[in-house]
Amino acid sequence: MSSSLILYSFFAYTALLFIISFITTRKSDNESFFLGNRKSPWFVVAYGMIGASLSGVTFISVPGWVENAGFSYMMVVFGYLLGYLVIAKILLPLYYRLQLTSIYTYLLDRFGFYSYKTGAFYFLLSRVIGASFRMFLVINILHIFVFNKMGIPFWLTVIAFMMLINLYTFRGGIKTIVWTDMLQTTFMLTAVALTIIIMKDYMGLTLGTLINKVVESDYSKIIFTDWQDKRFFVKEFFAGAFIAIVMTGLDQDMMQKNLSCRNLKDAQKNILTLSWILVPVNLIFLSMGAALMIFAQQKGIVISGTSDTLFPEIALGHLGSVAGIVFIIGLISAAYSSADSALTALTTSFIVDIIGINRNSNLNENKKKKIRYHSHFFIAIVLIFVIIIFKSINNTAVISELFTAAGYTYGPLLGLYAFGLFNQKKVYDKWVPLIAILSPIICYLLSRFSVQLLWGYKFGFEILILNGIFMFLGLLAISKRNKIVSEL
């Protein structure tokens, strides 16, 4: 497939997003950027969040992950069902009752200034790392197969990509993203379906025969019973539940879309619908990964890069131009889907939680808008630098790195919210940042030496749970005796 054809597909899709942005940003204001004026239809949000939840990581990394992990990721997905239920029944009612713009404002009311800033900091750190991982994966594929052949350096590819996202989101924010996410989800899922259809034709198989081959292969194993294995099904399930809670329920990016719904009931319908849709969707992605491995073996294809290049190498090099275009559109959809909402959420948290734009009575609407524009651009610059840095250190599947990073950065948030919601004690607020620093460090050391200390046990994604527990215990240790707060 020619580089020029890929490039034309990229620009055509980007132009479509700018058209949607133009339509949705008319008469937009700060409330539109932050919460879409709380008028987003829940079914549009739910459908669009499929793409945001999957992102480029699922589109690229999950299929390639099948080679070593099989379908064990499905136990994480089943855990999502429990996690999303907790979000719908506990977190969303809290956020709507307090009428929050940034969900971390809860920490200010519950604990105090330092706890609030700690929570906001860990979100910013977590989302910058997570968004950079996701964007790196997609931008790197585009660079390898398109821009590198044109002599364009990686750093320039990153800058161009981020500036395009910055341009179509800086005015409308969440109001625009709710609708672009719907478009991006459609293209992403269509790309997967068409790739499977094209691939089975190249293999000379019916769809039923291909499905049977996937089911009968070693790749389709879901349950791993060795308790020392990182893929042990019990810890995968509970890790999935807590990953959903922290990476959706305690994440400004994902919650900002839910808070744009008209009311709590709509937001709950949105999140519960999403949780059940993600089960078959992720199963399809994993099945495609197994089919790609079977296809590669049948055709004698040797994948030259990491597991993350399995899908792009086959789609762009062995399935013809139609499959190549389908893959590129799906890839771009996945990239934009996670990048635009992350940029908006990071901007929201930065100006609301760090700058304190809503607590400054001296700022009028125009001044707030100016601060928002400058902050939006600043966050884009930060993401550019982190993506470039990640390029120099990446050597494993991004999906694994993403969840590992989440275990350390979202853990303190998990502990803070768990303590605040299920314990009425006050804490010495100034000590909270120290506990939030020590907890991930202790978890890292324990994970690093777990084989020697815990009879061969290896930590996987459940390090997130342990991190949250240490944070909770630390808060308990610095709690004030005989002092409680009334329920918020």
Image (cartoon, helix red, strand yellow):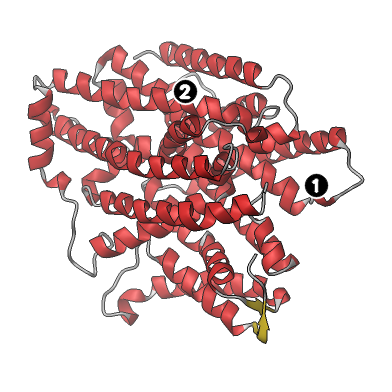
Q: Secondary structure at mark 1?
A: helix
Q: Nearer the viewer, residue 352 or 81?
A: 81
List the residue tagged with mark 1. Answer: 357
Q: Nearer the viewer, residue 426 or 340?
A: 426
Q: Residue 183: which disc?
A: 2
- Residue at 68%, 83% (x, y): give it: 483
Instruction: Kindly report the distance in space between the C-alpha atoms of the residues bearing marks 2 and 1.
Output: 32 Å
Q: Residue 79: which disc?
A: none
Compared across the picture, whether 75 is left or right of 33 comes to left
Picture layout, residue 461 above or below residue 347: below
Q: Quadrant of residue 110?
A: bottom right
Look at label 2 and name its amino acid. Leu
Compared across the picture, whether 197 is left or right of 124 comes to left
Q: Nearer the viewer, residue 297 or 342?
A: 342
Count of labels shown?
2
Q: Quadrant of residue 374?
A: top right
